[in-house]
Amino acid sequence: MNTKILVTGGAGYIGSHTTVELHNAGYEIVIVDNLSNSKVEVIDGIERITGIRPVFIKADCTDLDAMKKIFKTYPDIKGIIHFAASKAVGESVQKPLLYYRNNIDSLLNLLELMPQYGVQGLVFSSSCTVYGQPELLPVNEEAPIQPALSPYGNTKQINEEIIRDAIYSGAPYKSIILRYFNPIGAHPTAEIGELPNGVPQNLVPFVTQTAAGIRKELSVFGNDYNTSDGSCIRDYINVVDLSRAHVTAMNRLLNNVSATNLECFNLGTGKGLSVLELIAAFEKATGVKVPHKIVGRREGDIEQIWADPRRANEVLGWKAVENIEDTLRSAWKWQQKIG
Ligand code: UD1
């Protein structure tokens, strides 16, 4: 029998792609998702790619009884990949308590239940947002954690601390924290991808919607930063590449490869791209123009950040392999599919 993994938030953007890669690696998947920011049709997309329908349970990870029931029904769950979380920075400023409740209670429930049901490993979705604006670039995992700029960012920091404290207290499981840079793109089949809720806040969904004519023009938030062309720099990482890192991390946890019970890895390409460079790369890759104009800076934006992914490359044994043009083409193919 294949090893069973619980994927929380498995109907979401990164969760759905990771479910596909877990399946490809021979795992059996149980998805729990409250569908607060995703659609149940995503499960159909996963099934069309893999030929297997993952178990899907609509439940909220903050609901302890519902989570207990899942572990009772599937007592052979060996690992958890915890994606389920609220993730909109702006909304988190408006509704901080919702963010703290959702993002912290969920993790507490999982950590409390793991020992009771013999779950050995937890992979946690964190973000490069914990570094704020790093002094040294590229940023590695030893860089200081900076005060969070939003309740969302704070929940990621607090969650990392909760995991660390639980592990250091001698909890009988291991964990790997993955700090994502900027995940973009979609599965090459265009069966799954990012489904933004309303007006996209993130750059690439806004780019593809503008290219599709859904948005009149893209606003580039600032061209007066201290970067080569004045726009902000990020490390854009293909979502399938990113998903594969979760499989590698889960293998590592379940095969007892790591020397310590808690590890943390940056997941990025190691290459920074400015907003204007990304737009140019999209236009080149797809042949479609993206009308855009320069506007003022967005409050709270980091000027520039990109990853030093060497620890993930050398210790985890994972490397981003997809190139930016293919990645942007996959985002465009997905946009054309969803219309
Ligand atoms: C944002 C969050 C980050 C979170 C991540 C989750 C902020 C400050 N950071 O990352 O904490 O983990 O989302 O997805 O909100 N841009 C434009 N025009 C647009 C949209 C974006 O110019 O319409 C620019 C931004 O200024 C930024 C870059 O594109 O320089 C990327 O923006 P975005 O996709 O929102 O990601 P982050 O800001 O890096």
Image (tube, grey):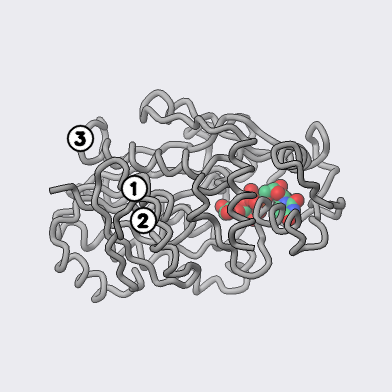
Q: Is residue 23 above or below residue 82?
A: above
Side (left or right) of 97 relative to 73: right
Within-10-Å neighbours for mark 2: few <14, some 14–19, many 20+: many
User: Which type of secondary structure does the marked residue at label 2 adopt?
Assistant: strand
Label 3: state its secondary structure: loop
Q: CA distance from mark 2 to mark 1?
A: 6 Å
Mark 2 or 1, nearer chain start:
2
Residue found at x 29% / y 42%: 250
The disc at residue 123 is 1
Label 3 or label 1, whichever comes before in sequence order: 1
Q: Say which residue label 3 marks.
A: 256
* Type of amino acid under label 3: Asn
Q: Do we see residue 300 in this rendering? A: no
Q: Amino acid at mark 2?
A: His
Secondary element at image label 1: strand
Of residues 68 and 96, the one nearer the viewer is 68
CA–CA distance in space, label 2 to label 3 = 19 Å
Residue at 37% in and 43% down: 246
On the picture, is 292 further left or further right than 9? right
Q: Residues within 10 Å of mark 1 (few under 14, many from 20)?
A: many
Q: Which residue is mark 2?
A: 82
Mark seen at residue 306: none
Looking at the image, can residue 199 be seen? yes
Q: Quadrant of the C terminus?
A: bottom right
